[in-house]
């Protein structure tokens, strides 16, 4: 497996990208970084080239994956869902994702996808399947895949299980749209970790369910999650998506990398 870190968790820049962490992560031995693409889209061209592309090149670490959190006005469900707006946003996203060499986009986007009160859930799933078809089609033009992220019940009211993400991936009609697995959300939902045996995920996120922090010690339940992933044949990327604490980011991140490597070894 390859190991990365989601830089948006504790960014120190005005853009919320976390590009200042790239040097540290590369030095600690992380295999890749996972950057927040919607924040990057908002950056001026010069800042994007200097702060993001420049850092990736200087420290020789790839942006294998990016989080894709669509803004609330780019609706995926409800009466305001607009396929043209979804497509326009994705074209802008892919322009910069392609320049970074990103091959995976993880679609969370609770604010954009949550079903409005009174709107039929079955209709919302129809709309999300349509939106994922659009998103996947545009991403495919850049040889990029889309991971559907199941969220926890406190954050979202649609797609909160691995099986529901698997269902939507099939309905999208796109081979590059697949479910991803997030240990933090699954643990909060008390979802059976063995669900990943149905079909291996596209990508994996990991954080300790307590306060969404980086793991500092091995955990038997987390190890069973990785055992299931290995049984399913998964050998892709694992992104740490947890808080490290600004006081000792380097120490917490280094320890988390050590722990996650140990837990993913059979």
Image: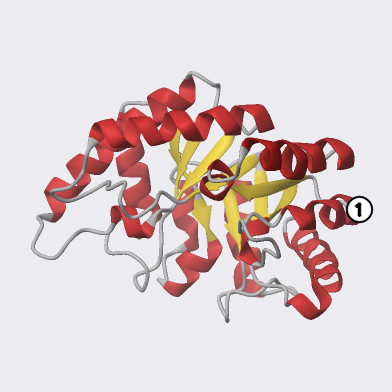
Q: Residue furthest right?
A: 27
Is 253 displayed left or right of 64 in the figure?
A: right
Q: Nearer the viewer, residue 191 or 13?
A: 13
- Of the 4 image quadrants, the one containing the N terminus is top right
Report x, y in % for residue 66.
Answer: 59, 44
Is 125 displayed left or right of 97 in the figure?
A: left
Residue drawn at x 67%, y 57% as measured from the top left: 7
Depicted 161 relative to depicted 221: above or below: above
Report x, y in % for residue 51.
Answer: 75, 45
Report x, y in % for residue 178.
Answer: 44, 38
Depicted 39 relative to depicted 63: above or below: below
**How many numbered marks are there?**
1
**Residue receiving disc 1:** 27
- Of the 4 image quadrants, the one containing the C terminus is bottom right
Report x, y in % for residue 78.
Answer: 17, 51
Q: Residue furthest top?
A: 141
Label 1 crowd (10 A; few <14 / some 14-19 / many >=20): few
Residue 36 can be seen, yes or no = yes
Residue drawn at x 59%, y 56% as measured from the top left: 205
Q: Nearer the viewer, residue 53 or 170?
A: 53
Is 228 displayed left or right of 259 in the figure?
A: left
Instruction: Locate residue 143: give its quadrant.
Output: top right
Residue drawn at x 67%, y 45% as measured from the top left: 237
Q: Nearer the viewer, residue 216 or 253?
A: 253
Q: Secondary structure at mark 1?
A: helix
């Amino acid at each position: 497996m390859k190991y990365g870190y989601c830089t948006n968790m504790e960014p120190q820049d005005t853009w919320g990208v976390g590009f200042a962490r790239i040097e540290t992560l590369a030095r600690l031995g992380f295999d890749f970084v996972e950057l927040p693409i919607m924040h990057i889209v908002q950056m001026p061209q010069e800042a994007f080239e200097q702060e993001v592309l420049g850092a990736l090149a200087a420290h020789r670490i790839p942006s294998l994956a990016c989080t894709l959190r669509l803004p609330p006005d780019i609706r995926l469900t409800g009466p305001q869902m607009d396929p043209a707006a979804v497509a326009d946003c994705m074209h802008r996203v892919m322009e910069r994702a392609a320049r970074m060499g990103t091959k995976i986009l993880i679609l969370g986007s609770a604010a954009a996808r949550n079903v409005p009160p009174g709107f039929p859930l079955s209709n919302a799933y129809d709309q999300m399947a349509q939106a994922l078809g659009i998103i996947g089609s545009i991403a495919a033009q850049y040889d990029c895949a889309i991971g559907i992220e199941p969220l926890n019940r406190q954050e979202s009211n649609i797609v909160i299980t691995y099986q529901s993400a698997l269902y939507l991936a099939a309905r999208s009609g796109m081979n590059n749209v697949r479910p991803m697995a997030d240990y933090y959300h699954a643990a909060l939902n008390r979802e059976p970790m063995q669900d990943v045996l149905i079909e291996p995920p596209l990508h994996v996120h990991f954080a300790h369910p307590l306060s969404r922090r980086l793991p500092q010690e091995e955990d038997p339940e987390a190890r069973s999650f990785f055992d299931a992933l290995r049984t399913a044949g998964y050998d892709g990327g694992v992104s740490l998506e947890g808080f490290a604490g600004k006081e000792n980011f380097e120490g917490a991140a280094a320890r988390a990398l050590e722990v996650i490597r140990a837990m993913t070894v059979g």
